[in-house]
Amino acid sequence: MNHSSLPDAPLFNALRRHADSGRASFHTPGHKGTCGFLPLDKRLDLTELPDTDSLFECDGCIRESEQRAARLFGAAYTAVSSCGCTLAIQGMLAAFAGAGSKVIFCRNIHRSAVNTAGLLGIDPVWVAHRNDAGNGLPGRVHADDIARSLDDNPDAAAVYVTSPDYYGCLADISAIADTCRRHRVPLLVDNAHGTHLIAFGRHPITLGASASACSAHKTLPVFTGGAWLNCADAEAIPFIKPSMALFGSTSPSYLTMASLDLARDWMEREGIAAFRALAATVAELRELALSKGFRLPEGECDPVRLTLLTRPAGMTGDQAADYFRRRGVECEHSDGCAVVFILTPFNSEGDIDLLRRALRDFPTCDPMTEESAFWEAFPARKLSPREALLRRAKVIPTEQAAGRIAGEAACPCPPGVPVVMPGEEIDENCVNILLKTGILRINVIE
């Protein structure tokens, strides 16, 4: 494309330049730009009409699409979102916990859930993760820690965990679900990065969760913003759509919803086998990475997420990402300790070969000192999330924030794991972490 003739449209131009760069996509969305799979064009960008149904009052083609998705996931009910996993999370918390309730949260919660808790006035009880995934990673929440928190908080309305996390680490959902059943509370799972786990029998609904928010566009051939809220609890079904309607746009994207419908059909016909075949490719890439000095996350992980701990190989994750980018490979995420690649069946053989050769040619470097995870201790809580989010706040330099109360969930993005929650006091440790991850300004309560 002749970039000198581009229109005066900065975003469009940036997207075209990146698309024309020729880099292999190991990031979202899962379709990897292979839009031939999605026979969708602007003529199908429609709205609520007599023959196209209405998302939040659906009883026609949208409902039929949702019923087929529920069949795929083995759910009692599945609802579509074209507003991303954020809407599924909002609807899940509103339907199962409700306003003013107490919810037990794992600490590696996405900021969309933090904001939803604030909007609904949910009182969060935080459960710490164990350092069981490797240095620099958040680790996993464990069932017995959830059990202790439930014993201490018998009035909790729900338990909310993230699995898999951004690095592909899987919590023991079966054990946590058993714990929740014994305490008679629902288990809600942010499964944003794990929609495809249905191919491996590791989807949260399969493992006993009451509900899951699944960001399908991350790993399936779905347009960005496509997600499902899966519900296994028949008693909660009447609350799902009204809860999502509280937060969702009244102008949902029919193209995104149609891509969900097509992806579900593909998963049933070809996708499950394709993901299982991909797992063998990822296993081979992992072995190659180990031979070059990288380390892998410990414990059970997503079979098709390639996360490499880079410091043992002599680079930070950000430095390694720059190396891979120069080799024509675009990763999903990098930080001081790791680099993350999202592979799907829509990565071509050429994509895989670029990544394989980049790994094979990775330069030999002396190992770097490893770093521990940075969210081991919780800052002191001074206000509830709702109080903090709704108060007047101002932006100040992060280096001046020690002793102030956070007016937002401050977190490196991606993956969006907060260092400090709204209403918590920002201590020196928080300041150091935020500065280290490039967050130079922060909202604080006035």
Image: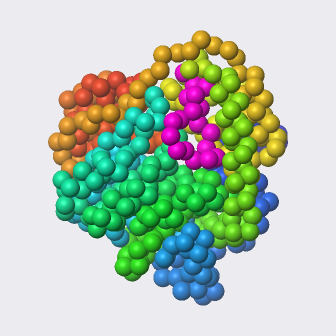
The vertical placement of 207 against 22, above or below, is below
Look at the image and give the residue range highlighted in magenta: 294-311
Identify the residue at image location x=49%, y=65%: 205
Indicate the position of residue 219 as horizontal and vertical percent values.
Answer: 63, 53
**Foreground residue among 441 and 148:** 148
Measured as percent of width and height from the top left, residue 279 is found at 68, 48
The residue positioned 37% from the left and 38% from the top of the image is 130
Q: Is residue 395 positioned above or below 95 on the image?
A: above
182 or 310: nearer the eye? 182
Left or right position of 386 against 201: left
Count of residue discs: 0
Name the residue at 60% across, 52% down: 218
The quarter of the image holding the C terminus is top left
**Which residue occupies 62% across, 39% down?**
306
On the image, which quarter does residue 16 sit in?
Answer: top right
Q: Nearer the viewer, residue 16 or 199?
A: 199
Predominant SS of the magenta segment? loop
